Image (cartoon, grey):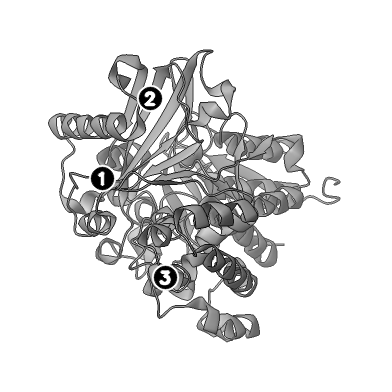
Amino acid sequence: MSVPVTRTDKTIAIVGAGPGGLTAAMILARRGYRVRVFEKDVQVGGRNAALRAGDFTFDTGPTFLMVPQILDEVFELAGARVQDHLELRRLDPLYRLQFGDRSEFLPSADHDETVRRIDALFPGEGAGYRRYLDHERRKIDAVFPCLRVPYDKPWHYLRLRLLKALPKLDLNKSVYDCVAQFFRHEHLRISFTFQAKYLGMSPWECPGTFSILSAFEHLFGIYHPIGGLFRISESMADVARGHGAEIHTASPVRRVLSRNGRATGLELASGERVDADAVVLGADFGYAMTQLLDAPDRGRFTDENVRQREYSCSTFMLYLGIDGGWDAAHHNIFFSDDYRSYVRDIGTGRLSRDPSFYVQNASVTDPTLAPTGSSTLYVLVPVPNNTSGMAWNADETAAFRETVLSKLESRTGLHGLCGRIREERIITPRDWESRANVYHGAVFNLAHTINQMLYFRPHNKFSELDRCYLVGGGTHPGSGLPTIYESGRIAADLILRDIH
């Protein structure tokens, strides 16, 4: 994997050192462009950055690594190999699922073992699992390649590959409808549809196309990079720097500069101006539209247009460094007694008294994250975004914290947990918006509704301003680390096509 044989005098300015921006940075730097990345925080990663509390280390956001083949591909495009930078550990079981009746299901990375566990818990349902895998494997083969190309023009819908895949897109069904044809028991249906929450959506409303999310987990596995998922972003930054990219942290951007309908660079908060032949926007989509682009450069994306779009839910986060260990899986999901009502509450902007929640017990796999004899607990609770009107002031935050800790003790068996906490950090939906610049605190960005997919999602080559490109969860193909890496690769390909 050699360095590029030619270099160019073209400069690419990238806003944000998140996964999408870093993917584009390392590919473009390897191809000989002068790449300059400007990140507002003191470290790279964005929502995929490290969060440190005393001697404990957490991932701020994503904790699941799926479809590592995509990571392999983008590293290879940057002239690097994942295994030279990261140690990936495949997890088994995939996760522990505990339902409202306190029964548990731990699907295995081994499909035959998963069939045995399904039949033991849900007699006669194992055959449905095999049918599900066969169906979803064919669906992925047809659909996923269609998500890896841009949809900047209406006639891109006429691509032969997409036309052939249309019957498998299941746009007339929900994720729940797609899975229900393979499983009778409600617990199993939830087990293969809760992944819609990765997009911040309800399984009963998320387009059926995304039934492939659970299939990705079962077919390709779930991985953990030793040191934390934030190590991926740090490794991407190392690769980009190795090809000459400049990554400026603690360098917030004030606005995108333009002339005659074309992006020409950036103005930093410090007042410095940076000239560029193209700009890559890796900031949160709603924030970028309303804060970083001048009104004439946004076109149809006015404040009102951005405000009226549909957004994902938010999350309430607890990061706990505790004394002692916890004998549980790496990933643990605890469903509320009435999961469907809980999901409905989120959609209507109500804070449930019986929330579902996710706990990452990373120390069981990765001892580098906590001192000897201690553990990290990462707790995520899906909650309404800030359109709900909740203030998340000190009293509301404290009250919900008590609710979550009480649930943790009663559902996980971690009795006396509060007395074991050595370090604690909290992020509320208001914090996501005010500190991380996440529009409405919608951490999974624009909802993945049919009218906000493919061509109807903001384009990777921004349609309103020439030489401006979008990466991240707010553009095509959407939220989640694998698809955000894809957005960075797509943007890099478009720049290579447009500016050579």
Proximity of marks 3 and 2: CB atoms separated by less than 8 Å: no
Q: CA distance from mark 1 to mark 3?
A: 23 Å
| Within-10-Å neighbours for mark 3: few <14, some 14–19, many 20+ | some
Q: Is residue 327 left or right of residue 384?
A: right
Residue beneath the point at 30% across and 65% down: 309
List x then y, in percent, for residue 193. 42, 60
| Within-10-Å neighbours for mark 1: few <14, some 14–19, many 20+ | many
Q: CA distance from mark 3 to mark 2?
A: 36 Å
- Taking depth in this image into account, of 425 and 130 the one nearest to the observer is 130
What amino acid does circle 1 point to? Pro
Mark 1 secondary-structure assignment: loop
Q: Quadrant of residue 127?
A: bottom right
Which is more foreground, mark 1 or mark 3? 3
N-terminal label among 2 and 1: 2
The residue where tag 3 is placed is: 180
N-terminal label among 3 and 2: 3
Residue beneath the point at 13% across and 30% down: 395
